[in-house]
Image: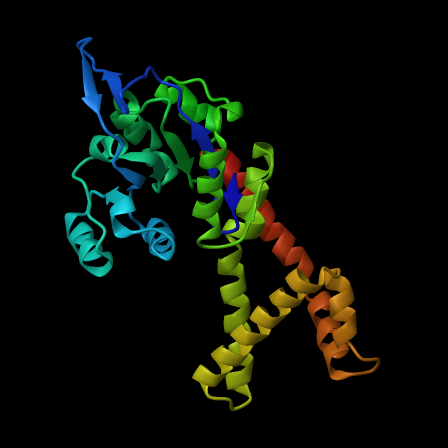
Amino acid sequence: MLNKKPDVAVGKSSCSQTTNGGSSGREVPDGRWRETKIMAKIGFIGMGNIGYAIMRSLLNKYKTEDITFTDLNRRRVAQIEKETGVKAVDTNQDCAENAKYIVLAIKPQFYDNVLADIKDHVTKENIIISIAPGITIDSVNEKLGGDYDKKLFEETEKQMISNFFESFGMMEIVPEYMMNAVVCISSSAPAYIYMFIEALADAGVKYGMPRDVAYRMAAQGVVGSAKMVLETGKHPGALKDDVCSPGGTTIYAVSVLEEYGLRNAVIKACDACYEKCIDLK
């Protein structure tokens, strides 16, 4: 399960759990059972730039009391609480116990420690959402001691997951083996596109255009072009041809982009990104 922006995997934990009168029991390390209640719907472990952006988007669909989060940077926690009204919890374990949907908004190198933190605090009712590159469902499942099965998802959970991702972008469902490709052409793509916008704007400045105007015009050109691809369904090459009049200004510019290897540079950049995803495993 994924969205255009982050690299995302969704798994349902199946650790030991029983249900009794609407509450659930978890077996704690000393063998006792204790009653718990799932309160907040969505809990973020980690609140970096991506996690924060996702949470802000979710607030367009969910109430502040439906979301919680935790982060090691207590100053940042206080700032986010003030800006959003979302209340934080103190620890990773608290987050796991107070949310049904647990978003691991952390870097790959922190996964082992965080999963060890929450292993004894999740049940088969929890749904784990990973947004880090190179992290597979099997690896998360193994560290949590569960047995993932996509058939465990209920219809209400599937709808919730769809709502989650569609709150901040367009959602596509692809096989997990394609996730590294998703990182290359979607998750990391904004950086490539920002560089392209910057280069276009620099050209405008070179010819005397004020920089703020150049940035707006270059960015709008990218927005309009992307909308044409999405809304018309036409091949990008065909749309390019529609803009290139015979002997006109655009085809001259396109021929120079081909001469200097724009396509090859983009593909090589994606190759490097793909290899890095593999290294992260």
Position of 26 relative to 79 (above/below): above
The residue located at (56%, 69%) in the rendering is 223
State the colouring used for the structure image. rainbow
Of residues 270 and 180, the one drawn nearer to the viewer in this rendering: 180
The residue located at (34%, 32%) in the rendering is 111
User: For this view, does 99 lie left or right of residue 9?
Assistant: left
Residue pushed farthest top? 31
Question: Residue 218: x and y, percent?
Answer: 54, 76
Residue pushed farthest bottom? 208
Question: Residue 53: x and y, percent?
Answer: 36, 55
Of residues 187 and 264, the one drawn nearer to the viewer in this rendering: 187
Position of 95 relative to 4 (above/below): above
User: For this view, does 90 lie left or right of residue 183?
Assistant: left
Question: Residue 49: x and y, percent?
Answer: 34, 53
Position of 130 relative to 263 (above/below): above
Of residues 123 and 187, the one drawn nearer to the viewer in this rendering: 123
